[in-house]
Image (spheres, rainbow, N blue to C red):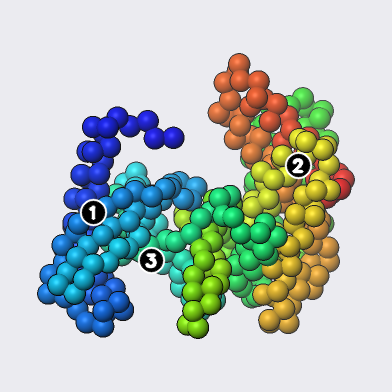
Amino acid sequence: MDHLSPADKIRRKQRMKHLLAEIVENLKGYFDELQLKEFGQKSRFIVLNDIHAVHKVGSKGLQLVTANFNSELGSLTITIAIKSFDSPDEALRNKILTNRLSEKLKNTGVATPRVIFEYGTKLIYEGIQGKSFYDSEINPEVKLLLTGEALSKYHSAELKPMEKERYVFLLKKTFRDIIMPRERKEAFVDLARKSLSNILGYSSGTAGFGDFHQGNVLFSIEKDNSNKKRIQVWLIDPEYVEEEQSADRMEDIGTFFLHSAIESYNKCGNLYSLWKEIQPFIEGYERHLSTVGLSLNEIYRNYESAFAFHLGLNVLLEGLFLQKRANMDDETAFDRMATCIALANHCWKVGLK
């Protein structure tokens, strides 16, 4: 919720207008590109008329902004996204990662943001359209299918061995820091190792998205060349996109369903409803794999076991995160921590039931 005073809102709008004025000044070529598309020619001058903040999307809050500008050819309204970082180095790193994501998804039909301007600790992205997975009113099963397909396109069909040490390290770190009785922890560690052993030896290695959750997937309704409406999927905020193919591809899927799993388990004490929710996602993931003659059953002996391992690891990491942030009087946080630990145990002992 926005708690800014009217004066602060005016100052923020003035800062944004100044920023966009710099974009106009420095990116005449970008606006020429827009005008060529709209009017068939370039203008001699451009004047920024107005800006309007829309809403934030993504895990770290990309601020969507509409900007209206005029030229002798006419007026145009565009949507751009602005994101602030802690330092210019971090902004540059995220520009590189955004370009890497864009290159990887080129010609796949999945849209990604394009950085059009750098301004100190800020990056300006070409208009990101649509609403997040949470907010989009598109049918839930359709969203899940399209999201699974988009992730499959990002992962690609190239098969590499997944890196065992990646998950050994994460398990060691988590069990070292999480608070629970020693005997229970020892039994838990043994359970985790057995679950990990079920997925070793697969050629399932891929470059992980790293933060593949529902806030980083957007859907917009657009028109194709024949003026028919279609759903456009966007992947945004690639702050943790990886280059090496060392992650197991089920890791990103486990991340995506993390909070759904916690809510399902907290409500029902099992994962039956979650498994039904996963099916359209897997169908979409398989749809892309099938174009190159592959399926998850060819990559894994049992992909459900792989998913159960990663879901368990993800919820345990979530429990550790809550533990580090929790106030000792925060009963809600401690209840959720307990749910995460119980759910990890369920994933590794029982599976997706």
Position of residue 126 measured from the top left corner of the image (x, y, whole percent): 36, 64
Residue linked to disc 3: 114
Question: Which of the marked residues, 2 or 3, is nearer the chain's N terminus?
Answer: 3
Q: Quadrant of residue 268?
A: top right
The span from disc 1 to disc 2 (Cα, nearest Å) is 45 Å
Q: Quadrant of residue 117?
A: bottom left
The x and y percentages for residue 103 are 46, 73
The amino acid on which the numbered mark 2 sits, given as a three-letter code, is Ser
Q: Secondary structure at mark 3?
A: loop
- In the rendered view, tell whether residue 148 sits above or below residue 268: below
Instruction: Residue 96: give x, y in percent of width and height.
Output: 39, 63
Compared across the picture, whether 275 is left or right of 30 comes to: right
Which residue is identified by label 2? 264
**Above-or-below relation of 74 to 10:** below
- Most extreme residue toward the top is 329
**Residue 29 at least partly seen:** no
How many neighbours does mark 1 have within 10 angstroms: few (below 14), some (14-19), or many (20 or more)? some
Residue 54 visible in the picture: yes
Residue 313 is left or right of residue 74, and the answer is right
Label 2 neighbourhood size at 10 Å, few (<14), some (14-19), many (20+)?
Answer: some
Query: Dots 1 and 3: beta carbons under 8 Å?
Result: no
- Give the residue type that dot 1 points to: Asp
Mark pair 1, 3: CA separation: 22 Å
Q: Depth check: 293 or 216 in front?
A: 216
